[in-house]
Image: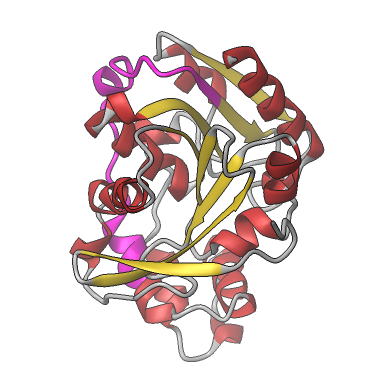
Amino acid sequence: MNLNAPEFSAFTHQGLSLAYFDDGNPAGDPVLLIHGFASTASVNWVYPGWLKTLGEAGYRVIGLDNRGHGASDKPRDPEAYRPWVMAEDAMALLDHLQIPSAHLMGYSMGARISTFATLAHPDRVRSMVLGGLGIGMTDGVGDWDPIADALLAQDADAITHARGKMFRTFADQTKSDREALAACIRGSRDLVARADMARIEAPTLVAVGTKDDIAGSPQELAALMPNARALDIPNRDHMLAVGDRVFKTAVLSFYEELG
């Protein structure tokens, strides 16, 4: 068990090689972590301490590099990144590991993927933690085409769109494949109908930073669901909320309550 630098393996789904780690307590309740856009399992979950936090609490911790990200294959077709397609990658990983059901925890795009997975496979999801995405799940999170343009721009210094510049900088820092990410951002923005959110019975924690200008209200999203609660992560924006101590403490308490 290496909670600071896990060993990655790979499996194949739909002809793509997808990277993942499987660490923590092998006998513990499994938690499947699904990272956000332009991130990786390591950037989202290992470096901010989630693997360590959950592993030391006794959970089996599984992290997936989404297609187009990290060490996984990177198709260029936007249709390959529809959220229900990526949701099947997550379920295929559980199949590969012979795990009947797990807690799903997703951040931003990963929260959207987790929701599509839960809608398609409610019997396989013990609970959800939706980080970095509130009512934007159903109402949208603004115009993301400039982000695709920023990712493909020849000259990063010429980018004037603030959010585009933020994600371009992040993509460059993580040494990402910017063409694959541009395809991903064009293909992964499908919304979830409010009526579909209301069908999700899995216990859910919706956690958003109070300075997050992307996610939308966690309270509004939680109110649509029969068994959900909201968490405000104080004084954190979209990029910084993911590793926050308040967020980690709330998730551990949430899981302890589930028993």
Q: In this view, does 124 lie to the left or right of 56?
A: left
Q: Which quarter of the rendering shows the N terminus?
A: bottom right
The colour style of the image is: secondary structure
Q: Quadrant of residue 192?
A: top left
State the image coordinates of residue 214 (x, y, percent, origin top left).
54, 44
State the image coordinates of residue 98 (x, y, percent, origin top left).
35, 45
Residue 194 drawn in magenta = yes
Q: Residue furthest bottom?
A: 154
Most foreground residue, 57 or 216: 57
Q: Is residue 245 above or below residue 6?
A: above
Q: Is residue 2 above or below residue 95?
A: below
Count of number-bearing discs: 0
Q: Is residue 162 above or below residue 106?
A: below
- Residue 43 in sight from this viewpoint: yes
Residue placed at 35% from the left, 31% from the top?
A: 138
Residue placed at 36% from the left, 34% from the top?
A: 115
Most foreground residue, 137 or 44: 44
Magenta region: 182-205
Residue placed at 56% from the left, 24% from the top?
A: 205
State the image coordinates of residue 17 (x, y, percent, origin top left).
32, 72
Q: Which quarter of the rendering shows the C terminus?
A: top right
Q: Is residue 16 left or right of residue 26?
A: left
- Residue 35 in sight from this viewpoint: no
State the image coordinates of residue 118 (x, y, percent, origin top left).
32, 31
Q: Is residue 165 left or right of residue 96?
A: right
Q: Which residue lies furthest to the front in this view?
A: 27
Residue 252 drawn in magenta = no
